[in-house]
Image: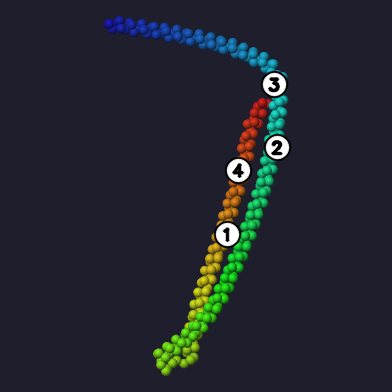
Amino acid sequence: MSLPDEMARIYGEMETLRQERREFIKGVKRDVVDMLSGMRTATAEMAAKMKAELSAFGPERAESAQKASAERRAFLADVKEKDAKMRAGFRRSHARTATKVKADLDAFASGIRETTAVMRDSFRQANAERTRNGAAMRAGFRTSLAEMAAKARAERRAWIYGEKAPPPERQEVELKAKEEAERKAREQAELKARQEAERKAREQAELTAKREAERKAREQAEFRARQEAERKAREQAAQKTEPRRRRTRGAQ
């Protein structure tokens, strides 16, 4: 097939497609006009039908409005009653919790005072017993020490000086100086022991107070958690009643 024939064929096909497109557009326009006309007719008929139905619905609408108003008043009265009951229950629960917390705090303070008194009495008794035992031990120790010192001095003089022993006055001075040094050493040891016992008693008292404070903090946290749970419960109840309240208002 030659080029002119091919171009003629293609041109003929293009004209055919243009004609088909024009016919298609015309058909679409006719369909749209028909649809709009039918829609206007249906809308007019529907409007007339709805107007007639609304005219007949007037008495029923008034009765429905009265019924909805009565239901709304009953619903509001029920909500107010439930809210009053919830508030009264919350006040009672809060009062019980406050009473319990106050009683627990009083019991805690009383227990601390009793524990402190018992610890002080025990410490005083132990200190008195330790003092008595220490005095008896010191008396026995001094006696034994004096005897041992006298014997040692005698043996030392006999070994060093032979018959040329120091005068008794010097011996007495040396013995007193030695006893004084030993007494000071014992007093320092006893002082350290008392300080250590007092430190342990203070640490025990601080530990007891810390544990009690932690218990009190836990109780306060639980009380706040209960309050938060009650608040959320009230909010959820209010949220549940809100859709019904809106439906009642919409019905009016």
Residue at disc 2, secondary structure: helix
* Cα–Cα span, label 3 and label 2: 30 Å
Residue at disc 4, secondary structure: helix
Q: Position of residue 81 (x, y in %)?
A: 70, 37
Label drawn at residue 23: none
* In the depicted structure, whether residue 59 falls above or below residue 28: below
* In the depicted structure, whether residue 180 falls above or below residue 110: below
Q: Amino acid at mark 1?
A: Ala
In which quarter of the view is residue 52 placed?
Answer: top right
Q: Residue at x 44, y 86 (%)?
A: 152
* Cα–Cα span, label 1 and label 4: 30 Å
Label drawn at residue 209: 1
Residue at disc 1, secondary structure: helix
Q: Residue at x 71, y 34 (%)?
A: 77
Q: Amino acid at mark 2?
A: Glu
Front position in the image: 11 or 182:
182
